[in-house]
Image: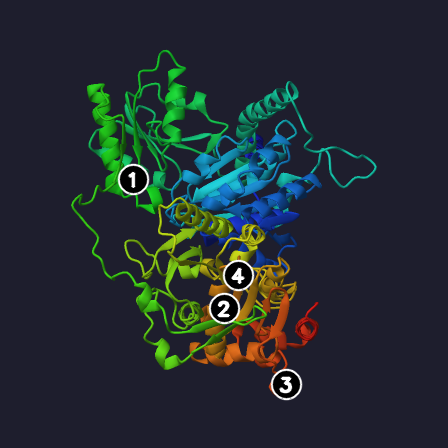
Amino acid sequence: MAKGLAARKISEEKKPLARPVQKITFLSGNEVAALAASQINYHVMGYYPITPSTEIAENLDAMKAEGIHDIRMIPGDGEHGAAGICFGATTAGGRVFNATSANGLLFAFEQLPVQSGTRFPMVFNIVTRSVSGPLDIRCDHSDIMLAINTGWIILLAANPQEVYDMNIVAPKIGEHPDVRLPVMVAFDGFFTSHQKRIVHHFEDREVVQNFLGPFKPTVTSVDPKNPVTIGPYMNDPDLINNKKQLSIAMENAYRVIPKIFREYAKLSGRRYNLLELYRMEDAEAALFILNSAAETAKEAVDILRKEGLKVGLVKPQVIRPFPAKEIVAAMKNVKGLVVADRQDNYGAWGGQMTLEVKAALKDDPTNKTKVASRIYGIGGKEFFLDDAIEMLREAVKIAKTRKVQVPYEYHGANPGDKNYVPKKVFDPIKEEEASGFLRVETDESGKIDVKGIVARNLTAMPKRIAPGHGACPGCGIFTNLNIFMKGLQGHVVVLFHTGCGMVVTTGYPYTAHKVTYVHNLFQNGAATLSGIVEMFEERKRRGEIPKDEKITFLMVTGDGGHDIGMGPSIGAAMRGHRMIILEYDNQGYQNTGSQLSFTVPLGHQTSTSNFGPYQHGKTTHHKDTAQIFAACHIPYVFTAAECNYRDMIRKAAKAQKYAEEGLVFGKVLSICPLAWRTEERLAMEIIQAAVDCCFFPLYEVEHGITTLNYDPEEKGKKVPVTEWLKYMGKTKHLFRPECKPELEAFQAEVDRRWRRLKEMHKNPYL
């Protein structure tokens, strides 16, 4: 009996401690990234929306409105600004979080080495996506591979469970006293970010916070008793020493990461290593592949194993620091290896992982592995089971023949038909076809007047945007553009910022544009069109283009484009390029799912300014871009609305004339039934109500002199803002008692701006 009790006691002593309770849920990668961030309860998140990472901020904002966390969420004016917010926040001594994708990461790029070089840890989720151009919002790894050498630790997550786990361990790795580096957690756009899977996560966020411990800053920018200099000017030999320290920190991370993985395994029951090896114990042929595609490749390994082929899979969990020693060990018996890269290092004859794997193997004089590079899955091209089998069979062939017949090749690319010639759908619009409809006259004082606005006559003018675009029903963009372009005579070249107007008109290989169209990203459209304008003028000066050739250059922006793109647009205004900028204000980043932009009014609800017990929609007033451009002292600024089409056409004609002097800016209010949550048939009533309540007044500024074109007070039509707000689902909450302060503040601000505008109308010196 005593013997049995003793044995039982020993057995109990060997039992591991009970792990914290974990819930089993069904979540996407973006959802669990937000969940992990909320449990960590970061101090600050600086962010800016970009597909497919935007849902992370959306989910966090929705949680914040419900009081689930109290992260201070700060919308940037672009990814570069968001990265700056994050850097500043890290210097002030707290935990910081961000998420982005593709060109967003590149726009933030300048800040990446600043963050690592000054050794301030933070966590940055990179939802991998193809880098444009051309624009493609689907997955490949071109973004993360461009950032691989910026001094950040990079963890990889192949599925939502790994996204959750890597987000939990990331702060502990980066904040380790021997490391102190920022950390990226990279997972595949749409494949991992949007696909739901079973996920185990801790029920109590205190478990997570106890695992991480309190944040311990080394230095802070907010301690007046201990002033510090952060980011000094540094010359040789100091900079090389700084970079050596960063290198040592990355070497330390190589030691620290496995230890933290082991700690997390004790807590969660899930063990991670620098490399995940699948059936590699006796593999003679293998596939090296990252993230979600590895899930498919495992099945391919199993299939070929049943055929008696000794194949295996290598999937890295960490690529910075690069697990070179582990790769060498894994390849000890491998004779044939295919490295599959979801990006290309153009001109280097292989993707980033291929080059690094080859370099690692080269350092082992005993290694005999032959390596082939295959570029796959660019722009979100699906990676099927057959693709994995084909790559593994190629590795088997290399192992048997000991030869690599094709060292570098694209897998799945289609050369197309070399004899294909695109059909000409429309003949070019001739100048005479788009001229002679209006009379634009200038009086002795230099004031421009427009005559001949007859709707029946203007129907004969050819449309510059063809029917057949893919806009949502009721979208106001094309109603506004078609009306506005009735006022532009002759030849027109348009440039569109990224946004709904761009996306729905140019789905390759089709286009809805009947005139020359150029696209560039939000942040640089105005500068791009400036270059076009100046090259046109220079080629005319040199006699390469007829001197009497006339083209009106028009940039179309919206969907929040004058947050991220405001700087370049103001730069173009100050340089005085002869062009028109037209902003369709649909009050949000509608092309990425209706996130907060600075044009969103106070209290209005978006997917990143949610309503809930702890938050009542957007917390700041709307940006007045027309007045910002008026302050640039350009020749002409105007606002227009589709409810007064004659006024819009008149202003378009004036804009075309004033653009002969310099830059012109115009703003139109554009309904978005989907995001505003309203009926499309009510568009005209809604726009008219916005004008009548003076939220969107109609006026023009000619050489600094303001003229009101419509005064609802004089006409006895002025209404309170509630007459506009009542139409829209995004503002229904403002009628609730708890939102009375926001509603009153919004009305007061609209009234203040209206009174100011009336005074400017009365006094030409204002």
The percent position of residue 453, horizontal first and vertical second, equals 43, 78
The type of residue carrying mark 2 is Lys
Residue located at (61% from left, 82% from top): 712
Q: Which residue is mark 3?
A: 714
- Compared with 445, 303 (above or below) is above
In front of the other: label 4 or label 2?
2
Which SS class for mark 1? helix
Is residue 363 toward the left or the right of residue 760 in the image?
Answer: left
Separation of residues labelled 3 and 2 (CA atoms): 25 Å
Instruction: Answer with the quarter of the image where residue 123 lies.
Output: top right
Residue 64, given in percent of the width and then of the height, sits at 61, 58
Q: Which of the numbered marks, if any, corresponds to residue 147?
A: none
Cα distance, mark 4 to mark 1?
59 Å
Q: Does residue 16 sit above or below 335 in this rendering?
A: below
First along the sequence among labels 4 and 2: 2
Q: Are marks 3 and 4 in contact (CB under 8 Å)?
A: no
Viewer-side label of 4, 1: 4
